[in-house]
Image (spheres, rainbow, N blue to C red):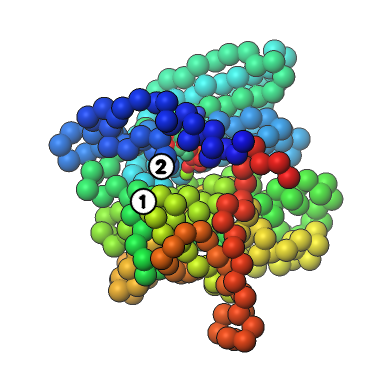
C-alpha cells in the first residue's frame, strides 16, 4: 500500500466536515474558520531517528531548527504565517543531556526566527529512537489561502528555489567520504538546516496572482502530481528549466549520480511550488525581485492528468516526453 492510499483510506472514514472546517485532509494544512475574514492553519509532521535524520552527522541544534522549519513550511505552503507550535518529544531512556540542550536551543531559536511561540507538547520515553512530532498553527486572511486544487490549464508552474540540494546533501553524508570542498556546503546545509519560505509565501498569497500552491517535501515529481490530481489537470515540466545550485553537478560527478533525478525525485527541498496565469508572469517576477527573491518557471499546466518531463526542448526532432508522475519519496513504496 502506498502512502497516499493509506491517507485516502483514513480520509474516507473521517466523517463529515464541520461547518467551520474549510479544508480537511488532503492539503498541506487543515483550514479552519477563525473570524469572518481570517482562518487558522493547522499542520503536523513527524521526524523519526534513522528514517528522517541520522544523529551521527546531524548536529542536535540543526535538527531542532529543521524540526521547526519542515512544519512551518506547510504553513507557508498555504501562504500563511506560523503563530503557535506544539512539540511531542520521544526520547530513549539513556538520552544524552547535552544533545537535548542543543536540540532545545535550535528548536526555540528557529521558533523565534519564524515569529512563532512554543506553547505546549508532550514528553515521553521512546524504545530506541528519538521521535519528534510537531504541530504548527498559523493564520491568514481567508480569501488569500492558496490551496493545491486551484491550478488551471495554461498556468505556468513555478518553483521558488534550487531543487535537489537536500537529496544530494543527504547522499553526500551517506557516502561517508565527503571531500572538504566548501562548494558542497550549501548541499549539506540544505539537508541539515532547510529554511521555510514564509516571507515569499505571504507575498505570493497577497499578490492575488497565484492559483495553487504547496511546498516541496517529497520531490517535484510527486508533489506536482498531488497538485495536478487535486486540480484535475496535468503538467509538463521542462528538464532544461529546472533550477539546481552550482554544486549539484560537482556532487553528481563525485557520487556518479544524475542531477536531474535529484531535482525531480529528491525530497526535503521545502521550496514553494505554485501556478499562475502566464499573463501574470511579469508581475510576479517584478514583485518577487523587489523583495530579493528569485523564482523559476519550470513548466505548464495542461489538460489531462499526470506529470511529464520534456527533454531536449526547442530541438523538435530530439524532444522526448517521459511520464514522471509520483516518482518521488514515498514512505511505503517498495523499491
Ligand atoms: P505534507 O507532505 O504536506 O506534510 P502529507 O503528504 O504528509 O502532506 O499529508 C497529506 C494530507 O494528508 C495532509 O492533509 C495531512 O494532514 C493528511 N494526513 C496524513 N496522514 C494522515 C493521517 N494519518 N490521518 C489523517 N490525515 C492524514
Ligand atoms: Mg506540504
Q: Are marks 1 and 2 in contact (CB under 8 Å)?
A: yes
Q: Nearer the viewer, residue 335 or 77?
A: 335
Relative vertical location of residue 171 with respect to residue 322 in this rendering, above or below: above
Where does residue 317 sit, x and y in percent of width and height? 62, 86
Where does residue 132 sit, x and y in percent of width and height? 57, 27
Q: Which of the image's four quarters has the N terminus? A: top right
The residue lying at 80 percent from left, 59 percent from top is 255
Where does residue 148 sit, x and y in percent of width and height? 39, 50
Q: Which residue is mark 2?
A: 27
- Tell me the SS state at disc 1: helix
Residue 29 position by quadrant? top left
Residue 291 position by quadrant? bottom left
Nearest to N terminus: mark 1 or mark 2: 2
Q: Which residue is mark 1?
A: 149
Where does residue 52 sit, x and y in percent of width and height? 65, 36
- Tell me the SS state at disc 2: loop
Q: Using a 10 Å C-alpha cutoff, classify the residue at mark 2 as few (fewer than 14 neighbours), some (14 to 19) or many (20 or more).
A: many
Disc 1 to disc 2, C-alpha distance:
9 Å
Q: Is residue 271 visible?
A: no
Judged from this view, the residue extending furthest toward the left is 36
The residue lying at 35 percent from left, 72 percent from top is 278
Residue 237 appears left or right of 39: right
Label disc, if present, on residue 232 of the rendered structure = none
The residue lying at 59 percent from left, 60 percent from top is 324
Q: Is mark 2 within 8 Å of ligand 1?
A: yes
Relative vertical location of residue 237 with respect to residue 37 in this rendering, above or below: below
Q: Nearer the viewer, residue 107 or 31?
A: 31
Q: Is residue 40 visible?
A: yes
Q: Which of the image's four quarters has the C terminus? A: top right
The residue lying at 71 percent from left, 41 percent from top is 334
Amino acid at each position: 500500500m502506498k502512502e497516499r492510499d493509506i491517507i485516502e483510506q483514513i480520509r474516507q472514514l473521517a466523517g463529515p466536515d464541520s461547518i467551520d472546517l474549510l479544508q480537511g485532509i488532503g492539503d498541506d494544512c487543515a483550514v479552519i474558520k477563525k473570524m469572518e475574514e481570517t482562518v487558522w492553519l493547522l499542520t503536523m509532521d513527524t521526524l523519526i531517528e534513522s528514517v528522517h535524520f541520522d544523529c551521527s552527522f546531524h548536529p542536535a541544534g540543526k535538527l531542532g531548527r529543521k524540526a521547526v522549519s519542515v512544519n512551518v513550511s506547510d504553513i507557508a505552503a498555504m501562504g500563511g504565517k506560523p503563530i503557535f507550535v506544539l512539540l511531542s518529544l520521544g526520547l530513549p531512556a539513556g538520552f544524552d543531556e547535552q544533545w537535548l540542550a542543543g536540540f532545545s536551543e535550535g528548536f526555540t531559536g528557529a521558533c523565534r526566527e519564524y515569529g512563532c511561540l512554543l506553547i505546549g507538547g508532550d514528553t515521553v520515553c521512546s524504545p530506541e529512537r528519538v521521535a519528534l512530532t510537531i504541530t504548527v498553527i498559523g493564520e491568514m486572511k481567508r480569501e488569500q489561502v492558496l490551496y493545491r486544487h486551484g491550478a488551471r490549464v495554461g498556468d505556468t508552474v513555478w518553483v521558488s528555489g534550487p531543487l535537489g540540494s537536500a537529496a544530494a546533501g543527504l547522499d553526500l553524508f551517506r557516502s561517508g567520504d565527503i571531500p572538504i570542498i566548501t562548494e558542497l556546503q550549501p548541499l549539506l546545509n540544505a539537508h541539515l538546516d532547510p529554511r521555510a519560505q514564509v516571507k515569499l509565501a505571504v507575498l505570493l498569497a497577497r499578490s492575488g496572482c497565484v492559483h495553487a500552491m504547496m511546498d516541496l517535501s517529497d520531490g517535484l515529481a510527486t508533489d506536482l502530481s498531488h497538485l495536478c490530481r487535486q486540480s484535475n489537470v496535468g503538467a509538463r515540466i521542462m528538464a532544461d528549466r529546472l533550477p539546481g545550485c552550482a554544486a549539484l553537478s560537482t556532487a553528481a560527478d563525485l557520487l556518479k549520480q544524475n542531477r536531474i533525478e535529484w531535482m525531480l525525485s529528491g525530497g526535503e527541498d521545502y521550496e514553494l511550488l505554485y501556478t499562475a496565469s502566464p499573463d501574470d508572469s511579469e508581475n510576479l517576477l517584478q514583485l518577487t525581485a523587489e523583495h530579493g527573491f528569485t523564482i523559476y518557471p519550470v513548466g505548464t499546466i495542461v489538460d489531462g492528468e499526470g506529470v511529464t518531463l520534456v527533454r531536449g526542448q526547442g530541438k523538435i526532432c530530439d524532444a522526448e516526453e517521459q511520464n514522471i508522475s509520483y516518482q518521488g519519496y514515498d514512505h511505503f513504496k517498495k523499491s
